[in-house]
Structure formats: structure tokens, C-alpha cells
Image (cartoon, rainbow, N blue to C red):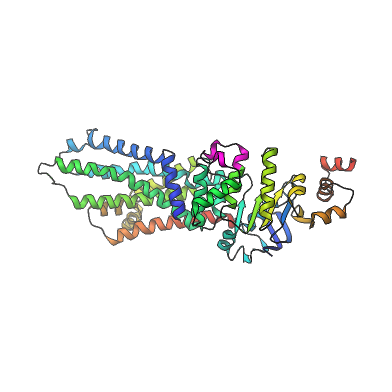
Amino acid sequence: MSISVSNLTKDYGKHTALNGISFEASAGKVLGFLGPNGAGKSTTMKILTCFIPQTSGKASVCGFDVVEAPLDVRRVIGYLPEHNPLYLEMYVKEALGFICDIHKIANKQERIKEVIELTGLDNEQFKKIGALSKGYRQRVGLAQAILPDPQVLILDEPTSGLDPNQVVGIRSLIRKLGKTKTVILSTHIMQEVEAVCDHVIIINKGEIVANSDLNDLRSKYPDKSLEKIFITLTNSNQDGISGREAGLN
Amino acid sequence: MLAILYKEISGFFSSLVAYITIAAFLIVTGLFLFVFPESSILDYGYAGLDSFFNIAPYIFMFLIPAITMRSLAEERKDGTFELLATRPITEWDIVIGKFLASVAIVLLTLIPTLIYYFSVYQLGVIKGNVDTGAVIGSYIGLLLLGSAFVSLGLFASSLGKNQVIAFTIAVFLCFFFFSGFDSISQILSFQSVSSYLMAIGINQHYQSISRGVLDTRDLVYFLSFSAVFLLFTKTILGGRKW
């Protein structure tokens, strides 16, 4: 198993963001991480990339524990953080070169060229990142994540802010990468899960409420769309607007 | 570490920070040395660079915090710190890389001032009648003082996301460590420990090296001063893990 998480808990002061979640992910599958805002998706990803430590429980990536061997974990991971932070004053190629230097990639120029082609940045490669539109910035973020050719890709809302054409492009890229690597992506967009993911984990208030193959989930709730399944699972004891809508439907 | 160092230096040069710092330093020191009558070498009458080495720490006190204020505060504000922290490098790599980049800029501001030495060398009544040893010592002292200020500036920059606060704290810390301990040691009730208090301050060690005597005690003082504040910086960066 390239990612295994067991009994992971994270407290921010008194607030419990993750409450003992366990799951596993293996190579060759795209794992969709679904949940309402504040469910703990980003927190899980930050723990897996060793940015913040868990309160208790264990998480390991490719056999390396995130607390004991953080450098080894970061070497095998490609991470696209939420909000996609970038050095806006850098040129696209310069930023990619910087990531290459950090990972000590040997044939730097070739790899940069490859990644630029993969992410469709050919026309923007000589521009400053600050001058790019949101969609192209997202591609730069993705390019930075896949640059060291990681075994595990962790993408926090990879398609937010992209136009429909770009979304299709990025999704097919993720699918392609998912054939050989372990990909975890978080999203709120149901169509995205249907288009990209093989396996779905739905998380709500720090707990896993569903963890199954996409097809199994569909056959378990045969007459419901994924959207309705999501709403049923995450909104059961909550009296929000969307909950009432779900009831009406 | 080298990747960070290279990125920071090219960042300084592509954002005008380096050019403006170097230009400001040269203009201010040039004015003090050759134009303003109270401190002008030409009016002073002796072939020496004393007024340059006396004024330089006070200019560094403002310039160096300006160089370092964005280095960590901005990374945190823009979230790019997450980008660095989730790559296979340690926090030490980040801190030392940024430290060395700023020290390199300090070195680059000092190099053009060699022309002051050259001018004074030529202007002596007997050509070359300058205390070269003291000048070399003072340059080493100024570089060490600069790196101590850089470590203070980085520390201030690591404290929060706001660059203005980082700058203000850094200026205060630089001033306090440079001459604050000298002033405190003047307080009557501290008379018994005044020499120890002065030894904590930067000024005494700077003056000592400026005489042209490179004492290992001063060297150890400056190196450990920077090391301690870099350690504080690294600890604060790791603070998200507490």
C-alpha cells in the first residue's frame, strides 16, 4: 500500500478536525477525497505531506512514516496545496527550475520541457507567473507537483478556477498519471469524481462516512446520483438549506 | 540549501531590492564621507576611513532589516512557505539559504566602498599613508556585524506575516544589540556588571575588530550571535508543529 493511514486524529486546540480516520490507497488508482467545507480534507493532506503533525494515529507514504522520516516522504510526494501558492514574481521556467534544484533533478532542462508539454504551458512558459490567469497558475502548480516524477500525488482541489476546456485537459492528465501512480485529490465537484476517480472516500466532520469503489457506491444507492448520496451522507444531522433541499427532492 | 540561496539572490536582483540597497548605502556613505563637512574626510585632515566605519553600522541598522523583512514574512503570507516546507529540504536549509543570500547582498554593498579606501590611499600626503591593517579589520568587522544584523532581521521576519512589523522589530533589535547594552551598562546600579553587559553588545566587539586585531573571542562572539538567532528563527518556523 503506498499510502496507509490508521486512526489519524488532529486537534486544533479544542476543535477536532480529524477524528480517528483510517484508509489506504494503492498505486494505479485515483482516490477522490470528498467532503463539505471544513470536513478535514486539507488537514489530512497536510499531515500526509508532513506540513503539520497529527495529534495521534499513524500515517505512512510508500512505507515511510510521516513523523519519523519526513524527508523521505516528501521525496516521493508531489503536492499541490489548496489555494495553489506560487512565487508570483518568478518566471514559469524559473519557478520550475527552482523546484528541480530542490529535488536535485539531473537532466533539468529536459524534464522541465516534458512537464511544460504535459501541462500545456507551452505558450506561457516565458511569462511571469503573476501575469498568468488563474487557470494557467493552476497548471504551474500542477507542473511543480509532478516535476520530480513522484510516486504519490496529493492534489488539493486541482481544478478550482479552471474553465471547462482546461478542466477536461487537467482531468485527463490526472487520469493518465493515476494509471501508474497513487493519486489523491480532494474536491467538492461531483462530476469531477465521476470523471476522474476510481475510489471515493467521503469525509464529514473529521470522520469517514463512506469508503468504497465508485461503482460499489453506485450499486449501493442505485437510484441516487452521486450528488444526492453525498448530501445524504454528509447532511443527515444538519439542518442546513441544502439539507432541506435534499429532503424536498 | 543552494537552491534556496540561488533563488533568494536572483529574487533580490530581479526585484530591484539589491540595486536600491547598494545604491542607497553608497549614496549615504558617500555623502557622509566626502560632502557633509562634520564627517568629511577632506575636512577632517587625516587619511583614515574612521568616519565611514562609524556611520556604516547605523546605515546597516535600517538597510538590513529592509532586505530581510520580506524573506520569511512574505513566504508565510502568500502560503509559499507550505510549498517549501513540503519539499525534501529541512528547515535549516531554508533558514541558512536565506541567511547566506542576505549576507551576500551585504557583501555586495561593501565591495564598491573599496573605492573610498583607494581614494584615501591616493590622497594621503605621503601616498599610501593609511592604516591598512585597521581598514581590513574594520571591513571584516562590518561584514560580521552585517551578518549579525541579518540573523536578527530573519528572526524578526519569522515572527509573523506582516513585513512592516518585521522591519520595525528588526530595527529595534539591531539598535538594542548594537548600542543598547552599552547604554544600559551606564546605569549606576549596574556598575558592578557593566563590563559584562558591554560584552553582550555588538558595539564593543565591532570596535575591537576595527582596531585591526582579529581576536578569536570577537570572532566567536559574532558567529555564535548569528547562530543563536538562526536557531531561534528555525524554532519559530517549526512552531506550527507544536
A3 part of magenta stretch? no
Image point (79%, 58%), residue name: A212
The boundaries of the magenta stretch are A121-137
Q: Give the percent coordinates (x, y) of residue B237.
A: 52, 54
Relative to A123, is A226 on the left or the right?
A: right
Between A236 and A106, the residue placed more toward the observer is A106
Relative to A157, is A246 on the left or the right?
A: right
Between A189 and B213, the residue placed more toward the observer is A189
Regarding residue B190, the answer to whether it shows in the image is yes
Q: Give the percent coordinates (x, y) of residue A161.
A: 66, 39
Which picture quadrant has residue A10? bottom right
Which picture quadrant has residue B109? top left
Relative to A78, is A26 on the left or the right?
A: right
Location of residue B231 with respect to A113 vertically, above or below:
below
Quadrant where the C terminus of chain B is found in the figure: bottom right
Q: Give the percent coordinates (x, y) of residue B162.
A: 52, 42
A136 part of magenta stretch? yes
Between A189 and B231, the residue placed more toward the observer is A189
